[in-house]
Image (tube, rainbow, N blue to C red):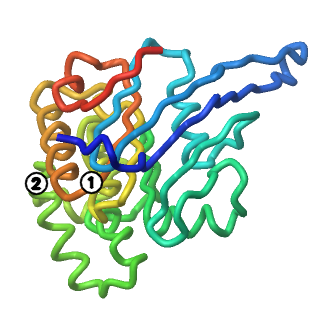
Amino acid sequence: MVDTMQTPLLQVQQLNKSFDLHLIDGRTIHPVKEMSFAVMPRQHFLIWGRSGVGKTSVLKCIYRTYLSTSGHILYDSEHAGIIDMTTIPERTVLALREQEIGYCSQFLKVLPRVSALDVISEPLRRTGMDVKHAHELAMRWLTKLQIAPHLWQASPVTFSGGEQQRINLGRAFITAPRLLLLDEPTASLDIHSKQIVIDLIRDALAKNTTIVTVSHDIDTLSSVADQQLAL
């Protein structure tokens, strides 16, 4: 049970994000309007709705891939206390991504000819872990993700869509970030692979990771959501 006396790990306050479509008569669209919510530590917060309602834009504003048009995103960081992700310097954003905040996009993006083993272990090696140890842990994760051993030295660009998504998720979960942002983690997955995602989320929550997920797949993910927000 979540302690209601705790400080939220993440507070989104009256968030707005607009885009000027310069190639389409200069019109402005507003996918995120006056959005507010709070996520407590070790919660899984699920934002769901149909495609095109601004779910991914919310995640990208939190991760600072997008700069918010207005509003505040308050994050209770481990080393600096409560900071506003909309105004902190870029160097602080980069440090948070390295040390505390993870992001998993809907699509895997990797360099060709880089093996699945190296893709999974790369986040560990960025933390300073030696290659041997990182590979050992990555092999355990590839087993957990049910990627066949004969594929470990192959490039994920040759994998099926479901296998690529599992590699993508493994790379995001492997460092147990303090805050993890998931964009459509069960999209295009079969029932068996969706269960793997559910297990990953449960394990991460048990290890004190806080998760914000955006998805249209409420049927799968609502079973592991502490809070839900419909757009």
For image coordinates 29% across by 84% down, the residue present is 131
Circle on res. 144: 2
Decide if residue 52 is on the left or right side of residue 142. Answer: right
Q: Mark 1 vs mark 2: which is more N-terminal?
A: 2
Relative to 5, is 90 above or below?
below
Above or below, 9 against 19 in this view is below
As drawn, 226 above or below 10? above
- Is residue 222 something one can see in this rendering? yes
Q: Which one is nearer the viewer's eye here, 114 or 167?
A: 167
Residue 173 image point, x, y percent = 29, 55
Label 1: which residue? 170
Mark 1 to mark 2: distance in Å?
A: 9 Å
Residue at the image point whose x is 12% and y is 34% from the top:
195
Residue in the image at 49% along x and 72% along y: 79
Question: How busy is the neighbourhood of tag 1: few (under 14 within 10 Å), some, or many (20 plus)?
Answer: many
Relative to the observer, which residue lies in front, 39 or 93?
39
203, 157: nearer the viewer: 203
Task: Please name the amino acid that badge 1 sits on.
Answer: Gly
Please tell me how crowded label 2 is: few (under 14), some (14-19), or many (20+) other residues with Cα within 10 Å: some
**Residue type pointed to by label 2:** Lys
Q: Is residue 193 left or right of residue 211?
A: left
For residue 58, which quarter of the picture?
A: top right
Q: Is residue 126 left or right of residue 30?
A: left
Residue located farthest toward the front when viewing the structure as drawn: 5
> In which quadrant is the N terminus drawn?
top left
The secondary element bearing badge 2 is classed as helix
Residue 6 x, y percent position in the rendering? 35, 49
Residue 168 visible somewhere in the drawing: no
Q: Position of residue 103 (x, y in %)?
A: 44, 49
Q: Helix, strand, or loop for circle 1?
A: helix
Circles 1 and 2, Cβ within 8 Å, touching? The answer is yes
- Give the residue drawn at x 44%, y 41%: 105
